Amino acid sequence: MPAGFEHIELVGDKVRLRPIRASDAVDAYRLLTDDAVLANLAWDGPASEAEIADTYARWETEFRAGEHCALAIELADKPGMVGCINARFPRHPRQADIGYWLGVPHWNQGCMTEAVRLVCYLSFKHLDAARAYATVFTRNMASRKVLEKNGFSVDGTLRHHVFKRGEFVDSWFLTLLRPEWETGWEWFSPRLENIVFARGK
Ligand SMILES: CC(C)(COP(=O)(O)OP(=O)(O)OC[C@H]1O[C@@H](n2cnc3c(N)ncnc32)[C@H](O)[C@@H]1OP(=O)(O)O)[C@@H](O)C(=O)NCCC(=O)NCCS
């Protein structure tokens, strides 16, 4: 990971990724109060719009510090946040922990498959990742398919991984290793990319 980011913009055929801002809380809160989105997230969702604005303000700081790529998903031809995708590097600077959600009106149109492809491109091509990984509730086949369509495979099941709404939920642990990305996806490039690392670091 670099010492910091000034900007990231990655555009595909369907979606545009750009840094999350506290002002995205309005759109995010509206989309996140749909239970269909929250049911498959380990997070139980924000209690208020102000809470999510605080979280996104913190993520802006972490983004500038190069600790966390918290990116808003927009439709490629229309400004306005429709979802979120994160790449965190919590345990090791070359291990990208990927998480995401998308507003219900945009499901099943290939948006997250492309968003994950763009974040893998960012992680492997620009951030020197050795491995990307994600955890997915075992009832969430759509999310598993998003990852598998990007070359991830299931390493195994994490039993009773998350306590969600009064019960333990199992998760799949999926990974994509650098050689697998190089073999399968190195051909891929965004329609547009603008990645600016912090100067002087
Ligand atoms: C999971 C999620 C990210 C998928 O995003 P998306 O943009 O709809 O995904 P895509 O359209 O790129 O791909 C979805 C794939 O799953 C398939 N799918 C959808 N629902 C399915 C289901 N119930 N069972 C099996 N496959 C399913 C779709 O047909 C598609 O596959 P295909 O391209 O082979 O037809 C989105 O539904 C979401 O945000 N859900 C709530 C939050 C969440 O689950 N986040 C991930 C936590 S790990």
Image (tube, rainbow, N blue to C red):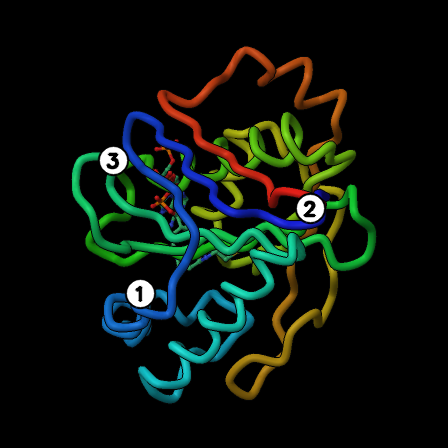
**Mark with earlier residue (3, 1):** 1
Question: Residue 88 placed where, x, y %?
Answer: 65, 54
**Mark with earlier residue (2, 1):** 1
Question: Residue 104 placed where, x, y %?
Answer: 25, 57
Tell me the CA gap for discs 2 and 1: 24 Å
**Mark with earlier residue (2, 3):** 3
Residue located farthest toward the front when viewing the structure as drawn: 200
Whether 112 is drawn above or below 183: the answer is: below
Whether 117 is drawn above or below 174: the answer is: above
Q: Residues within 10 Å of mark 3 (few under 14, many from 20)?
A: some
- Left or right placement of residue 104 versus residue 89 in this view: left
In the image, 136 versus 192, the foreground residue is 192
Tell me the CA gap for discs 3 and 1: 17 Å
Residue matched to label 2: 96
Whether 175 is drawn above or below 71: the answer is: above
The amino acid pointed to by label 2 is Ala
- Left or right placement of residue 83 versus residue 77 in this view: right
Q: Residues within 10 Å of mark 2 (few under 14, many from 20)?
A: many
Residue matched to label 3: 76
Q: Residue at x 82, y 51 (%)?
A: 92
The image's mark for residue 24 is 1
